[in-house]
Amino acid sequence: MSNPNPTSLPRRTVGEWSLQSGKVYKEPFADVTVDAIFTAPSGQTVTVPAFYDGENTWRVRFNPGEAGRWRYRTVSRPTNADLDTRGEFEVTERAADGFLKSTPGKAFGFHYESGKPLFIVGDTTYNLFGIAHCGGDVESFMARRAAQGFNLLRVRVPVSPFHPPDGYSDWQTCRTWAWGGSEQSPRFDRFNLDYFATVDRVVQHAESLGLGLEMIMEAWGFEFPFNSRQIFLPEWEELWMRYLIARYDAYNSLYFWTPLNEYEYYPNGDWHHKPVADRWAMRIARWIKGVAQHGHILAMHNGPRVPPFAQRFAADPDAVDTIMYQEWGSRDRETGWLAAGIEELIKQSFKGWKGSVVFAEYAYERNPALPLIFPGHEFTGPEHMRRAPWRGAFQGMGVIHGFENTWGPFAILDEDQPSLPYLQHLQRFFTEIAPFQYLHPTPHLLKEAPREEGYRPAVLAAEDLSQVAVYFPAGGEITLALPAHGYAGQWFDPRRGELTSTALSLRSGSMRFAPPEGVDAEGHPLDWVLVLVSTS
């Protein structure tokens, strides 16, 4: 965080201005509204809400994207001369990637303002803020994740102390209720400033590490208060979301605003697709974009996979930028290792969709040393958690992993699970071996008869076919419809992260391929990736 009330600020840096009121308000969170209007050297204006931070103090956080002399003024309702101010500051140029932007159809859907593409590799850490508030060493965990190559964390602002059927959060040693009052007697016109001081600390640590955050504004819809819309009224929802935007929208580490985890829980906590939930999603997305004027990506996280999102949001197709997509694939005893069915549902869900997509949830890796508090995790071991992200990535998506150690009820922050190296191998493949920004799903290159679900290979290729990659989830043999000029090829092992030492030299003729033979300890066929590079 920069110095308060700065007179000079580097471009794409968070500046903070504080306003002190001599008048004491009974309900300062709800009864006073303060906005700051910033005017850029180019004349463009940006309106940013202020937030109350205790002791008769309001704060404004703003992140300028243009170098030069800026002006600002603050406006209060009802009018308070102490809160109505004017000022100027200088913004100096600096090299910065800036905010992440949704760029559907380009480089898996995401570029920074600088034009640099991003292959998203994330981790699901829903209760990170709550764990930090209860004394967990989240700073070391975040630093380790950054060093391991992660660039995004999924985090919910409100804490989930329980997940049915048996998921109590043993790490919770103090109150993490984000509002005033209590769950039994809530005060939605007040906020827990001690808790938000912790959230500030974690967000600022992410900023220092270069880690992005998906800030989920409302947790699961089956829990209070989000399952009680007759209590958590639209007025309180607006006050809550405005407060989050005022406090965190200025950060570069804010990659996504996601209004509700599995938004179809709206309005009553009942998990199924509801057209009224789609109406809420479009309305709240537009409202957030009107208030959060730094222009961060607006995402929706799904529960049900169908009907297609283009159909759901047809009334306002530009309201939602990104779908944080959830599909676990097969997770039964017999086929949980295969994570079958993911590609087929992706194709159904995104028929006609014009926005970007992240493969944000494909199960949580089971830790056999922990009690089975969520039965759906029983057969989502390392084999499932290796194949699922490859399936998503070969549909042109960045991926967000999930570990039982850290996803919610458990807080084993210092222990990595077995599938972690697999995710690192995937990231290396798409950033060093077959650069993702040039690749697109190209299923038409695959010439083959239909196969059993889960066993079908998937193909990515550059537009000029100078590079081709094929993922084989469980062996098999394929023929590719490629031009007659030559290719050099190698096999990439998703288990070890290595290219085979023997290269394939291919000339005109049959482009027929079968991966190296072999099975794992359970007798399942191994997965492989074929990499072809044109020699012409």
Image (tube, rainbow, N blue to C red):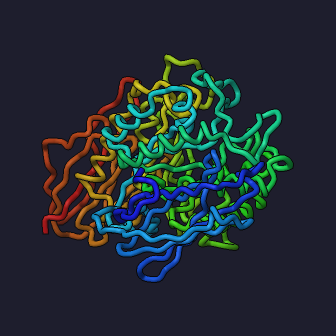
- Front-lying residue, 176 or 336: 176
| Vertical relation: 190 (above or below) 41 | above
Q: Quadrant of residue 148?
A: top left
> Do we see residue 247 in this rendering?
yes
**Left or right, residue 409 beside residue 253:** right
The number of discs equals 0
Q: Position of residue 367 (x, y in %)?
A: 49, 23
Q: Residue 351: image x %, image y %?
A: 57, 66
Q: Which residue appears farthest toward the front when viewing the image? A: 22
Residue 401, position as x, y percentages in the image: 46, 41
Residue beneath the point at 72% across and 66% down: 77
Q: Residue at x 70, y 27 (%)?
A: 165
Q: Quadrant of residue 49?
A: bottom right
67 on left or right of 320: left
Indicate left or right for 516 with 352 as reference: left
**Residue 441 visible here:** no
Does 422 appear above or below 249?
above
| Residue shown at 46% from the left, 35% from the top | 384
Q: Quadrant of the C terminus?
A: bottom left
Instruction: Place residue 83 in its image quadrant.
Output: bottom right
User: Where residue 469 sits in the image (x, y, percent)?
Assistant: 30, 56
Q: What residue is shown at x 61% (from left), y 48% (from top)?
A: 53
187 and 367: which one is in front? 187
Most foreground residue, 347 or 480: 347
Q: Nearer the viewer, residue 281 or 314?
A: 281
Q: Specify the farthest residue to the right.
A: 230
